[in-house]
Image: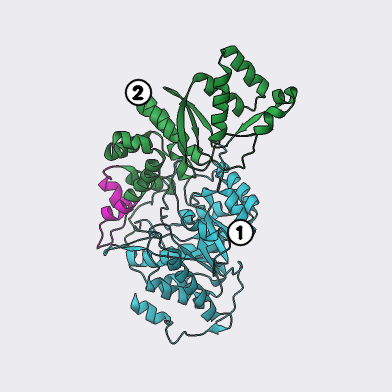
Chain colours: A green, B cyan
Amino acid sequence: MVTDFPKGKPLSLSKFQQLYSKLTKDSKPDSKILATLIAKRPPLSSRSRMEIYRYAYFARILEVLESDFPQLRKKIGKRPFAKLMREYLAAYPSRYANISEVGKNLSVFLRKKKKSPLANLAALDWEMSLSSFAPSIEHRDFSNLLSLPEDQILKARLYLDPSVRLLKTDSHYLIFGPHGKAQFQTVTPLQYRLIQEIKKHQPLSKLLSLMTRSKISEDFVVQWFTSWSKQGIIAGYE
Amino acid sequence: MKKRDSLFPDLGVGIGFRREFASHFSKQIPHPVSWIEVVTENYMAWENDIQPPAIKTLQRLRKEIPIVLHGVSLSIGSADPLNPSYLKRWKSLIDAVEPAWVSDHLCWTGVNGENLHDLMPLPYTEEALQHVANKIDQVQTFLKRRILIENVSSYVEFNQSAMTEWEFINELLKRADCGLLLDVNNVYVSSKNHGFNPLDYLRAIPRNRVGQIHLAGHSDLGTHLIDTHDEPICEEVWRLYEWSREHFGPVSAMVERDGNFPRWEELEKELLRVKEIQTEVSDYGYRLPQGKAAQPFEISAAL
């Protein structure tokens, strides 16, 4: 039984938890709140006991964010990254069940802070993180596609590996990682559009009309599709 | 030892399944593991419907071995109401995996919609007790199954607590009609951090409500212990488990390891020790292994 129960009405559970959350997140926990909530239990002071929770809260989330945003962390450095993440969490507290979702608003946050280059980097890191999260599927050989009758070729729909993601910021990015290791490459606006259309399961006829309109050389097109196939970006056709 | 009228089946020896040793499960289930526990949120769909790829591994394992789902974000102790989206996604996972049972922690992880991703202790008050009992009732009604709630380790006590943790849990189990996932290491860690006798705690728990036991290691920082799950299980916790096996009877028990991962052989030794204790302390009574098993007063003195 805890014996030093304060006189007067106890705090409601809701008020109690709001104050405790504040102690967990504030850089300098308020002494009055500490004294109100935390029982004195030597040899550790109330502040030292609360510090265990304060440390664990931020360290756990920071570890996940460092893992999800490796390029951003490398670009700005460990300490500034940690400081930035504290600001981010204050602006965008996690409302997610899975801690891996905590970083999903980071690029939006940075953009609002007018830090566009960092926002772009964060967006790329995030898309790579999501890409590596994708399930793996069996890829299908589609070398026989061109041997089909023309009308069937035009109706065929290519499909992409689930890890393929597109990002348009300062450049057009194609992100993919069929084996769990995400990588990215910059692509031309036309390549971006083609992948976008494949993602929407558009038939080859639609892709061909796009290419015809852009007056792109047939050699280039063959080169792109061969490369995407070899890299595991295109997984098959149906 | 009395045979108990348990609400949960004894599945034997389990392990908290982590990707760091998933390769040991790729061809066959390693001895002596007879069930596994996984972290619910690692397999649940995200808010935006992204489905973790690991669900396929889980469904494959489920064909070979019983699985239990152990959550970290239900936040049953939060003053907030239950999150309908969370419940819905949890239920979908349950339907997909058909676990032997599901569990989460007796704690709160945030308030006003926020998740601090930490297991924070409750003030042991009548208000908190009734609030948590009501929420567990809502969960069990929604899931149409009895759940287990795990005692957490803690580093603070609160001025406004009006009862002990074990009084709180005992009453909660009755009011909510749920089971207890008894973490023996957490009892030990909290007993050292708050200066109580762990046997007072364990004796107060109703036998038939204990559905699962967790065993894990912690870090000793001299003035206090931290529940890190990155060290081997200490001797005192093994003694408490032996005592618990004798007292609570056949209960599924498992080893949790979440960091500083050793070679599989080291984990295997701990799993075999769980198996040995389960075998020694069987339905037919407690057979002392060469006088090694401690009686309660000996454990108490040792702690």
Q: Nearer the viewer, residue A193 or B256?
A: A193
| Amino acid at pointer 2 | Lys
- Mark 2 secondary-structure assignment: loop
Q: Is residue B297 above or below residue A18?
A: below
In the picture of the structure, the residue carrying the numbered disc 1 is B146
Q: Is residue B22 above or below residue A89?
A: below
* Residue at x 41% of width, y 38% of height: A93
Q: Is residue A52 magenta?
A: yes
- Residue range corresponding to the magenta coloring: A27-53
In the picture of the structure, the residue carrying the numbered disc 2 is A114
| Amino acid at pointer 1 | Arg
Is B230 left or right of B16, judged from the image as shown? left
Q: Residue B192, how many percent across, how many down?
A: 33, 67
Tag in front: 2 or 1: 2
Q: Nearer the viewer, residue B74 or B126?
A: B74
Label 1 marks which chain's residue? B
Q: Residue A107, how many percent across, how many down?
A: 41, 30
Q: Quadrant of the N terminus of chain A?
A: bottom left
Q: Residue A14, how many percent across, how many down?
A: 43, 46
Is B273 left or right of B35, judged from the image as shown? left
Label 2 marks which chain's residue? A
Q: For marks 2 and 1, give the CA distance.
A: 50 Å
Mark 1 closeness class: few <14, some 14–19, many ≥20 residues within 10 Å: many
Q: Residue B15, how many percent across, how many down?
A: 51, 63
For the question of whether residue A125 can be seen, the reply is yes
Q: Is residue B5 magenta?
A: no
For the question of whether residue A1 can be seen, the reply is no
Q: Nearer the viewer, residue A134 or B136?
A: A134
Find out whether the residues at labels 2 and 1 contact each other: C-beta distance under 8 Å: no
Q: Quadrant of the C terminus of chain A?
A: top right
